[in-house]
Amino acid sequence: MRFLPSLTRLVAVGAVAILGAATLTACGDDSSAGADNPYDLLQPGVLRAGTLSDAPPNVYLKDGKFTGFDNDLLSAVAAKIGLKVEFVGTDFSALLAQVNNHKFDVGSSSITITEARKKTVDFGNGYDFGYFGLDVPAGSSIKSFDELTGKRVVVVQGTVQDDYASGKGLDPVRVPDYNGAINQLKAGTADAWIAPAEIGETSAAESGGKITVAAKLLSPAPTAYAVAKGNDALRKALDKGLDEVIADGTWSRLQAQYYPGRPIPADFKPGSGTVAVPAAPTASASATS
C-alpha cells in the first residue's frame, strides 16, 4: 500500500509529460498550417472566388466554365502566386458581404471601388476602368442620362449604377441580376437600364434588335478584386501578381480579346501604376490567342 502514492505521482507526471508533448505538437501543426496557407484561404492553394454567371464580357458562364475578362485575368494573377482558382456563382448584392464573411476568398465581378464599399471589404489595385451604359428598348426616344427623370429605370441592386440612379433622384427599380434587367427591357416594363457599358453593349447585341444603347458615361473609379477586411497578405499577393500579368502582356491581350477597339483613358494606369503596359495585340492576333 505504501507504493500507491508513488505510483499515483508517476502517473500524474506521465500525464503532464504527454499533455506537454501534445501541446508542442499542436503548436507545431499551427505553424505548419500557417506556412502552408499564408493567405488564410478557405482551402490552401485554392482561391475561392465569388463571381456572376450572367454579365458578359466581364464575368459569365460559357460551356459550363466561368470566364470573361475579370475571371480570366484573376486566373492569370493567381497562377503568378501559385494558386488555382475555384469560381462560384452568386448575386452581386450579396457578394461583398460574402467575401468579408469568408464564404469566398475574393470577389471577382467588375467591382468599382467606392468609399462605402471600403467599409465592408478591402480592395486591391485597380485592374480596369469602365463606363455606364444606358440601354433602352428599341425605338425609345431616350437619348441621354439627362432624360431619365420620371422614367422607370432598372438597375442591379448594390451596383454603382444603383448608386448613380439614387444620387440622381430616380428611385430605380432594383433587380438581383443582369438577366432580370434585360428581361424588363425586352418586356417593355422598364424605360431604361443603367448598366456597365460593356455588359449593356453585349446584351443589346444579343437581344435580336429589342434593345439598343442610347448613351455611355465614364465611370468615376476603377474596378478591383475584393478581399476580406484585414487580409493584407492576400491583397498584397494579388497586387504583385497583377503587376506581373500587366508586365508580361496578359492584361493587354485580354483587353483586346474582350473589349476589341475600346479606347483606354490616357490617365488610367492598371495595377500599381509603376509597370509599363505593353501595347495590345492586333485584332487578328488576339482572336487566335
Image (cartoon, rainbow, N blue to C red):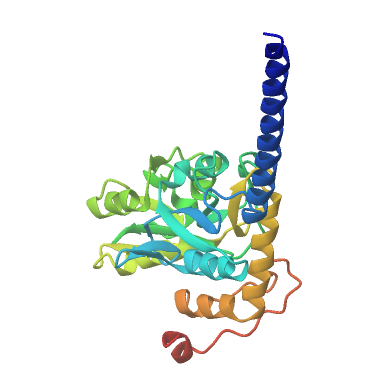
- The answer, for residue 145, to whether it is visible in the render is yes
Point out residue 65 in the picture as x, y percentages from the top left corner.
Answer: 35, 65
- Seen from the viewer's position, the closer of residues 96 and 180 is 96
Q: Quadrant of residue 26?
A: top right
Point out residue 155 in the picture as x, y percentages from the top left corner.
Answer: 42, 47
- The answer, for residue 213, to whether it is visible in the render is no
Q: Quadrant of residue 24?
A: top right
Residue that sits furthest to the right in the current view: 274
Relative placement, left or right, of 165 versus 123 is: left
Relative placement, left or right, of 111 versus 18 is: left
Relative placement, left or right, of 1 versus 65 is: right
Tell me the quadrant of the picture where the N terminus can be found. top right
Residue depicted at x 32% and y 58%: 140
Residue depicted at x 67% and y 30%: 19
Tell me the quadrant of the picture where the C terminus can be found. bottom left
Point out residue 93 in the picture as x, y percentages from the top left corner.
Answer: 46, 42
